[in-house]
Image: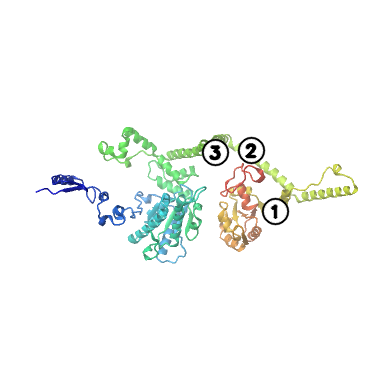
Amino acid sequence: AAASPVVIRPGVVRSGRLRSRVVAVRAREERTDALGGQDYILSQASGVREELFKGSILGVDADVATGDLRARGEIKQFGDIKDHASYHIPERFLDRFATHIAKNLLIDRGANLGSVPLILCVWGGKGCGKSFNLELCCKRLGVFPVVVSAGELEDPTAGKPGAMLRRRYLTAGKHMSTSGAPTCLIVNDVDAGVGRFKDDKSTVNNQIAQATLMNLCDEPNRVSVGGEWRSDDRATCRRVPIVVSANDPSVLYAPLTRNGRTDLWMWEPTRGEITKMVHDALDGAPGYGGESDALELVNAFPSQPLDFFGAIRSRCADDAVRRFIARTGLENLGGVLCGHRGREGGDPGWSASGLTGMDASLRSLLEAGAEIAREQQNVMDARLSREYVANWTEGPSAEEIRARRSMERKMAGANSAALEAAEEARLASIRARAEEAAARSRSAEARAAEEAARRALTEASRRAKEEGVDLSIAVGASAREPDPEDVEREAMAAEEDALPWRVIDAIDCYRSLKEDAAVLLDVRPRKDHDREAIKGSLSAPAADLSGGISDRVVTPNLDNMASRVAKLTDKLKGKTVVVVGDGEPYVRDAIRALRETIGEEVAEMRGGQVAWLKYYTPAGKPRPRYVGYGKDNEETFWTASN
């Protein structure tokens, strides 16, 4: 009988004599997946119609086949933190994190705690341990977070970051419901992902991501994901606390960071907290001498953040790594580090944990810290980008900076005490002459005498004209119109002399702040203070602001200031209270009220906030001397940015 044909592939027919060979080949094929042999998903692309696995809508790309649309496991287990108890968590940080988690979970269980913000924003300078301390707190409290990085908040497709945030929020809520363990959503460096910086353009995803976070704050138990926005019971979920880290939350969308949605908390560890964290990080290292070494190390570099000391610990292992390279040999290094050499010809039991020879003595730590600080300073001194960019005109060149810093170092090394004394004497002499000249110009008797002489000359000139005699040459003087600016300054000086309190300029305020002898009290309306304020100033609004830019209305409210000052008594004790205003009449009314309510000296800053910004930035840094103001410099003028 004729052998039945065998179909090898569509359109090609072979006789039955090949059947046994095909079966044998198929039997020898190695089964590498659950379907056996060649990947089933790729085999379905051959055109075979099978709706059971492919589906009738999406085909081979259906979720059941590829899993691309499936939510993957995003719960972080912190497997890289083996022994969390060996790391020190500052009590302030742990207390703030635990309180935020507990308050939100209590609200979810029906507790009546008022309006509890869903988001806790931990912000502060770079390298102060915000993200790592969050992970340690989660590990210590048994919280399983879902982590989002700043890079995931942007995508070529509009709307994906917002959907991703909602999906991960739901993942955390589902894990809390199924496992009974607390969860949270952590967004690292949120300002880098969705913040608005100078000359940046906002994207649709920036807006949607921030709007999604706002919506989660407003409706934390009703979240929808998918093509259709659901509002029924299927969209309900558990309330999941959100914690975000940032360096500068002011670049975020203001309604997102308002009270009720976000709890802003600045994390700036004290030197004692840094010492404890450094001690726990170095504890157990060879040569480490205990907490006294950590204290001396931190005191040696007082202006460095926490990550600087982590870099020191890593730098101390460099000598041990170099000895390992020399012992292994450069030709064998790649094989040993990648593991192949250890399996084929090396030691099969070798592991990186056996690396020894690290020196964490105080001497090595100080040397490593000095080396890292020196490299940091080299970057600031060189600034080679100024030489690479041909049209760079802002500030001095890199060569000028290097020359100036070299001269400063030479001056500091050559009898710096004598130079400082001479400079202080010179400045004191200048100040004395200036005060003497100001006293002469502001003397009431001198001004009265000048006015009497001017009237006498005018009367003599009038009589001479009536008699037909010109006496201008014989008298030797003629009346002239006074400068309006001089008249205004004299009137202001006379008004200040009549006040029962001192009026000091911005420069003297800056010196008093540096000496910790004064504190700034900003009595402007709250909106003005939130828009721009001097760093470290305390807000006690003595007026309310309403209306817009064109119809601005300022209403005095001294009762509000009095209630605010009553809460700031400890911060004002023992210091001169310098009132910062905006030139409105309510400012001096506020000063009179303050002199009656507090027992400290009260002074007024001449010119208020505007005068401060002419000489210093809001952060308290002196402005460059070459920046002109008004007619002082016709080429460069003062603006709010420079």
Residue kind at label 2, given as amino acid type: Ala
Residue kind at label 1, given as amino acid type: Glu
Q: Disc 3 and disc 1: Cα gap in Å?
A: 45 Å
Task: Tell me what residue is drawn at x 47 percent, y 46 percent.
Answer: 305
Q: Disc 1 and disc 2: Cα gap in Å?
A: 34 Å
**Residue 422 has which mark?**
2
Q: Which residue is mark 1?
A: 496
Q: Is residue 273 left or right of residue 587?
A: left
Residue 58, how many percent across, how many down? 31, 55
Residue 300, how many percent across, how many down? 48, 42
Q: Is residue 293 visible?
A: no
Label 1 packing within 10 angstroms: few (<14), some (14-19), many (20+):
some
Quick one: SS at disc 2?
Answer: helix
Q: Quarter of the image holding residue 500?
A: bottom right
Residue 331, how many percent across, how many down? 32, 32
Residue kind at label 3, given as amino acid type: Trp
Quick one: SS at disc 1?
Answer: helix
